[in-house]
Image (cartoon, rainbow, N blue to C red):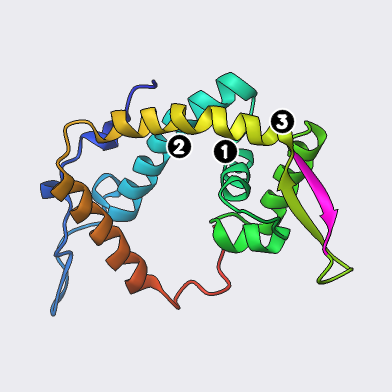
Amino acid sequence: MNKLTEADKTTPETIDFLAETEAGPVSAFELETFFPYQVRVFYSDVTRALSAVYQRDYGMMPAEWRTMAILGSSSTGLQATEIVARSSMDKVVVSRAVKRMEERGFLVRESNEADGRSFLLKLSDEGRAVYEDLGPKLKQVEQQMLDGLTADEITAFLSVTRKIRENLAGDLDGVSD
């Protein structure tokens, strides 16, 4: 695993949760203690830990794995637009991932009988085998990430992330990352 960045050493106590008062800003902007920056660093570390597995074993990129995971958990084929909606990926990123996966034989396109103008994407037999091979390996990395945390801490973390997403709901319509 890669070494964590310096920003990862920041404790929650150093993040200025009360950055503003009625009189205005309390302190100057500091990137290292800015909550969105901390989240981005956290996301990068988590993604690196997981991608070390699927890149090493199958040469896949994060967008390909996410696409595979979404298709792997679906009992029927999905349109590319559904993959975009279920993931945090832009339609161009999904399109490129689908193309690479198709070239590698990990997925197949089938005519959508409900709408003759579109296709349904499904994992091929080879793609399904890769998905089933990676699942337990990635669950092991997840367990390593969560090592030392109690069930209550994990539940609290998930609750906080849900509340933050609820706070942002509606503000992000039409905005991509």
Vertical placement of residue 95 versus 62, above or below: below
| Residue in view at x 21 percent, y 53 percent | 155
**The N terminus: image quadrant:** top left
Chain-order first, disc 2 or disc 3 = 2
The CA distance from mark 2 to mark 3 is: 24 Å
**Magenta stretch mostly in which secondary structure?**
strand
Magenta highlight range: 107-112
- What type is the residue that disc 2 sits on? Thr
Tell me if label 1 and label 3 are in contact, CB under 8 Å.
no
Q: Residues within 10 Å of mark 2 (few under 14, many from 20)?
A: few
Residue 11 occupies which quadrant of the picture?
Answer: top left
Q: Which marked residue is nearer to the observer: mark 2 or mark 3? A: 3
Chain-order first, disc 1 or disc 2 = 2
Element under label 2?
helix
Residue 157: x and y in percent read 23, 52
Q: Which residue in the protein does label 2 denote? A: 47
Vertical placement of residue 160 versus 168, above or below: above
- What type is the residue that disc 3 sits on? Glu
Q: As rendered, which of 20 and 7 lies closer to the eye? A: 7
Q: How crowded is mark 1: few (under 14 residues within 10 Å), some or many (20 or more)?
A: some
Residue 120: x and y in percent read 77, 57
Which residue extends farthest left?
Answer: 13
- What type is the residue that disc 1 sits on? Pro
Residue 139: x and y in percent read 40, 33
Element under label 3?
helix
The CA distance from mark 1 to mark 3 is: 18 Å
| Residue in view at x 30 percent, y 46 percent | 38
Q: Which residue in the protein does label 3 denote? A: 126
Residue 141 occupies which quadrant of the picture?
Answer: top left
**Residue 62 — which label?**
1
